[in-house]
Amino acid sequence: MTATPLAPVTAALRAMFGTDDLPGLARGLLVDDEFGWAPATTLIDGSRLPELLRAATLRWGGTPHACAALAWKSYSYWTALPVVLGWASARRVPLLDPSDVLIHFEDHRPLLTLGLRRSTTVAVLPSDPLALVGHPEVRVVADEAELLAVLRASLLDAHLAPLIAAIQAEVRVGTRTLLGSVASGISHGILRAADGLPGSTVQTIDTLLGALDLADLVELVPGPTGEPSVQRRTCCLAFTLPSPKVCQGCCVRQA
């Protein structure tokens, strides 16, 4: 097929970054040759999670829980970005079952790279042209409410929440700290992609965070020139690193 169901997502990513070569995602999102890739289930079941946490410790040199929090911040950002951009740009939501998300550690510029299997299911509304085509990887849902429900069930309940539990079995780091990075990553992603998205970015963020029950973890406040800016209510722990970093919008900055 010449245009994949994820074409609006890759177009939104291209508009957002100005290139198809992204630091944390496979080119074009979909992985054709899976040699060297492993499913994200290998993080959740613990078999490759120590490898990710070791890589984070080597990169940042902080305490185990701080490096785990920063590894999570990177992973959850790149995992959530195609989902929220798909919803915001075209109401097409890739359902990121951990078995359909592929990871590798071969490119040492980013901490890890994520891609999707070609069999990854994409949820769409009945009004989407894909609803009439009959692609096996397309799931038609009843309405906007159900689309948000399956977005949450796939991204948060089936993927990110089990990975949080796996991380917490290795290091002591709070759930609220980790979910704060999800909320912040989604908000930053939508704001950065704003020029290529229809409608109000503030309303888009509010709707997505509301569907994920993450709305209390960030606040949108006016930036230096009045544009929306993300203010976190939890910290990613970057300020604890040997070379401390206080991110824009960090709650530590406000303390």
Image (spheres, rainbow, N blue to C red):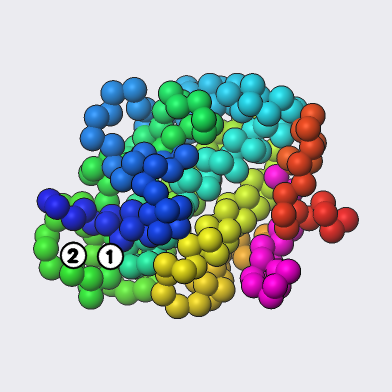
Residue type, label 1: Val
Residue 220 in magenta stretch: yes
User: Which element carries disc 1, helix, strand or loop?
Assistant: strand
| Cα gap from disc 2 to disc 1, whole angstroms | 7 Å
Location of residue 6 with respect to 174 vertically, above or below? below
Residue 118 place in picture, x, y as percent = 23, 43
Relative horizontal placement of residue 14, taking residue 167 as reference (left or right): left
Above or below residue 39? Residue 90 is: below
Disc 2 marks a residue whose amino acid type is: Leu
Whether residue 10 is visible: yes
Residue 188 figure quarter: bottom right
Residue interval drawn in magenta: 219-236
Q: Is residue 125 left or right of residue 151?
A: left
Q: Which residue is label 2 attached to?
A: 130
Closer-to-camera residue (168/182) = 182
Say if residue 154 shows up in the picture: no
Residue named by callout 1: 124
Element carrying mark 2: helix
Q: Is residue 10 magenta?
A: no
Q: Residue at x 12, y 60 (%)?
A: 134
Labels 2 & 1 near each other (Cβ < 8 A): yes
Q: Position of residue 166 (x, y in %)?
A: 56, 33
